[in-house]
Every structure is written in C-alpha cells, then in structure tokens.
Amino acid sequence: MSGDSISYHTAGDGGDVYSYEMADGSVLYPSQARWSIPCAGSAGSTQVTLFISPQGRYYLATATYNRKITKLVSATARFVTPKVTVDLILKGPCYLVNLPAGLQSRRYQMEDGSVVDTNNAAKHWSACLENQNKEYVDEHLHLSRKGRWYLETLRYPNPNNYCDHVGSARFIAPREAAGWILKWNHKLPSELQEFANELLE
C-alpha cells in the first residue's frame, strides 16, 4: 500500500472533497467510487467513509467540517487492505449489513478436486475491469497456503449491487501469475522474481 493522501481538492470554496491526490501519484474521486460505506466519526464535525475505487482499491477518507458555517476544514485519505476493510466493517463503526463479494471468504472446488478458500490465501492481489455489457468484473489473484497460484473471477450482473455476484476460479502457472501481476502494475513478490527479466521488455 502506498501511504496517505498528500493533497485534496474541493468542488467549490469549502465544499465537499472532489478528489484526493495520493502519495503514489494516483488520484481518487469519491464521486466515482463503486461503493461507499459511511462510518461513525470521532466527533459530530468529522465524517469517515470507506470507498472502493473503480480500479478496485479500498481507501478510508476522513473529512472535518466547521459545524458553525458547514465548511470543510481538512480532509485526508489512505489506502487500506481488504483485511483492514473487513475489520472496520465487522468490528464497527461502519453501517453495512452484508459484506460486498470482494471482501467475503469464498470457496471453490478446483478441477483436481481440491477446495480453495480465499480466506486462507497467503497472499492476495486485486484488479477491476468493466466488460462490454457494462458488468463489473473483479479479478483476484491468490497464492494458496500450500503454494499454488489461482485466479478468481467475480462477475456482478447488477453494478448497483456488489453483494450479488457469480464467481469462478482456476489454478494458473507461476509464470502466468507473474504476467498478471505485472499487467496490473503490482510489484512482483519474491516467489515470482525469477520471471521479471523474462516478461519485462
């Protein structure tokens, strides 16, 4: 994860946050989030919200307002891992009844008869894309605790309901896993460093 926001921009003088510029150079637009979850703030003048960006990245935003004149005083955002996101939702104080599919533990029976549980994965990477039918599609690459790589695909027939999904998974070779990680601009883990020179041109 690449740290906190370094600046923010508002839609108007003292208005709501329009965008956050992050330390890794990315820009987050709350209005474009796939979903957001309001959380209870530490005080009445503070709003804390969990977001998932169109690219499938989870981030936590905190905005502080001057209650007397309803003006934004400060705002920050930071990327959080799926595990932290789940903890925030389940342990409170976020207002959500059902976890979105991308944060649920899921099991798949593979072609060789084995069963993988995403909650048991030793490592995890995510990517998000949109197909021609305007369905959202999430891809999650997992390294099982037994050292096997598998690619999970989640399709959301209704883009407005991220608890409704169809999932599938397949084992893939380490070289394919390395290519997938590089394609989505993730850093290669130590287990796949041997493919860096071969795949990058």
Image (tube, helix red, strand yellow):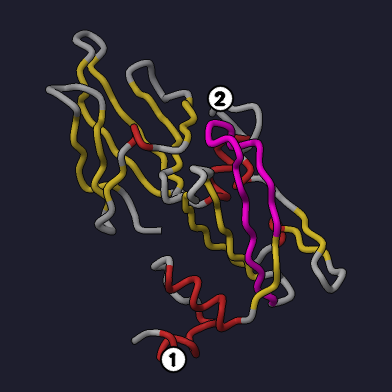
Range of residues picked out in magenta: 148-168
Residue at the image point whose x is 24% and y is 33% from the top = 18
Residue lying farthest to the top in this orientation: 68
Where is residue 195 drawn, in percent x and y?
48, 87
Name which residue type carries label 1: Glu
Q: Secondary structure at mark 1?
A: helix
Image quadrant assignment for residue 11: top left
Looking at the rendered image, the disc whose residue lies closer to the viewer, 2 or 1, is 1
Residue that badge 2 annotates: 95
Residue that badge 1 annotates: 198
Picture layout, residue 9 above or below residue 170: above
Asked if marks 2 and 1 touch (Cβ < 8 Å), the reply is no
Q: Is 160 colored magenta in this rendering?
A: yes
Classed neighbour count for the residue bearing mark 1: other residues with Cα under 10 Å, few (<14), some (14–19), many (≥20): few
Indicate left or right for 1 with 117 as reference.
left
Residue lying farthest to the left in this orientation: 13
Name which residue type carries label 2: Tyr
